[in-house]
Amino acid sequence: MSRHAVDDGCNDNVVSKSANAFVNMCIATSTPNAISLAEIEEATKSDHTMQCVFKFLSTGKWDLREAEGVSDVDLSNLQQFQNVKHELTSVNDKLLLRGSLIVVPNALQGKMVDLAHEGHQGEAKTKKLLRSKVWFPKLDKLCEVVVKECILCQAATPQSVRAPLKMTDLPNGP
């Protein structure tokens, strides 16, 4: 058997089917149970930043100056999308994937963090749970803010206060 097999054209259909099966598996496993896929698609359709990312992905040109009607906040989010542009995949211009993770539109980001923080398990476990299924720009920052503002988490987390250092007196001479 040769390492350079003859391309007969029949493998393209198999590869396409397996790629679609992989994308569908990623979507099915990454969709959180508390939010439906239709809700994510609807929020994605109404999110201006996500629509700009879809346009950039389809054209292949990531010129942020060409994005029309973009505010400074959207521009920083678009910059974060540009940093991971090689990992992004568009699914029928309805859903955006970063690797095998669903990219959450701006309107649902707070809801996602609240759902992940529901058990009040702390900052690290909340981030870990979110990173296993979804991605969005500034995920870490939003998690930190939500956990630090949570009264139940503040009450349950022990305060680690260090005792002040006691300096010894210096001798008067050698």
Image (cartoon, rainbow, N blue to C red):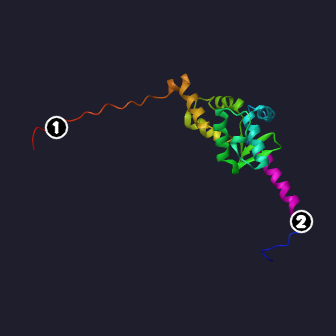
Q: Position of residue 55 (x, y in %)?
A: 78, 43
Q: Amino acid at mark 1?
A: Leu
Give the main secondary structure of the magenta stretch: helix
Instruction: Using the rendered view, name the quadrant where residue 162 is placed.
Output: top left
Which residue is more in the foreground, 74 or 108?
A: 74
Please tell me whether residue 22 belongs to the stretch shown in magenta.
yes
Instruction: Using the rendered view, name the quadrant where residue 116 is placed.
Output: top right
Furthest residue toward left: 173
Identify the image quadrant of the C terminus. top left
Q: Position of residue 88 (x, y in %)?
A: 72, 47
Instruction: Using the rendered view, name the quadrant where residue 53 is placed.
Output: top right
**2 or 1: tag closer to the N-terminus:** 2
**Residue marked by disc 2:** 9
Instruction: Report the Cα–Cα distance between label 2 and label 1.
Output: 85 Å
Which residue is more in the foreground, 146 or 161?
A: 146
Would residue 63 be found to the left or right of residue 120 on screen? right
Residue 170 image label = 1
Residue 154 image label = none
Q: Amino acid at mark 2?
A: Gly
Q: Which residue sits at x=13%, y=38%?
A: 171
Can residue 25 be spotted in the picture?
A: no
Q: Residues within 10 Å of mark 2 (few under 14, many from 20)?
A: few
Identify the image quadrant of the N terminus. bottom right
Q: Position of residue 68 (x, y in %)?
A: 74, 36
Which residue is more in the foreground, 119 or 77?
A: 77
Q: Residues within 10 Å of mark 1 (few under 14, many from 20)?
A: few
Would residue 139 be found to the left or right of residue 148 on screen? right
Q: Secondary structure at mark 2?
A: loop
Furthest residue toward bottom: 1
Q: Are marks 2 and 1 in contact (CB under 8 Å)?
A: no
Q: Which residues are magenta?
A: 9-29
